[in-house]
Amino acid sequence: MKKQYLRTILAILLLVCAVPSFAQKVSVDRIEEDGRHQIMTEGKNFNIGGVKYNICMKVYESAYSKDWCLLISSLSYISKYSARVLLKLDNDDIIDLPVNNVHVGKVTMPSYGVTIGSITSYSPATEADYYSSVYGLSTDDLDKIENHKIVKIRFSDGTDFRDKEFESNSLGKFLRKCHKNIQERIDNPLKEKSIYDGF
């Protein structure tokens, strides 16, 4: 009984120590060509209607404004004209986010082999389109996400739509953490380094 109790305590301590390693981090912090400061978090994968989407948040900060954005990226097609996101909150409010723009880049899909018995079939590496779509978030949207749970997302890629329900508010918690980490970076900017530092 005592050994089981000690194992349980050890497992809890290991879990608590591991949690910070999964914390959401800032992945981009730079000045754009137009002079705006861009800060973006790392993304997290969500399976929505059987398709994998990577979701993150960014802000473009200037002397006059902060433009908050939700980013959704995928190997699956996303229309730059008619993609749309609906976020349903626990008070039945709906945040409606039309697409702002879509960037299409190329990624290399690795080669792979399939072995059946003594025969192996190889498929070479190929290039695939990777779609990154941007949706503007107002301060009102951010306040709603902060104060309410996101219970459902509906994502339209422009040709079809896919739903996912969230019982544990995993998307809402993730977006709150993204917002918090970006705001902390805005409030505590990195010290600018000079090429001469320590030379």
Image (cartoon, helix red, strand yellow):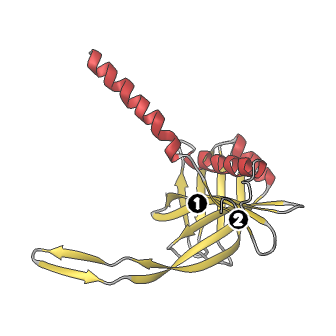
Q: Is residue 154 above or below residue 100?
A: above
Q: Position of residue 135 (x, y in %)?
A: 70, 65
Dot 2 or dot 1: first in sequence order is: 1
Residue 157: quadrant of the picture: bottom right
Q: Residue furthest left?
A: 118
Of 131 and 196, nearer the camera is 196
| Residue contact between numbered discs 2 and 1, judged by CB atoms under 8 Å | no
Of 21 and 143, nearer the camera is 21
Residue 161 is labelled as none
Q: Position of residue 105 (x, y in %)?
A: 56, 80
The amino acid at mark 1 is Ile
Q: Residue at x 54, y 51 (%)?
A: 165
- The residue identified by callout 1 is 55
Q: Is residue 54 above or below residue 113?
A: above
Of 31 and 88, nearer the camera is 31
* Placement of the C terminus among the 4 image quadrants: bottom right
Left or right: 126, with 112 as reference point: right
* Placement of the N terminus among the 4 image quadrants: top left
Q: Secondary structure at mark 1?
A: strand
- The residue identified by callout 2 is 196
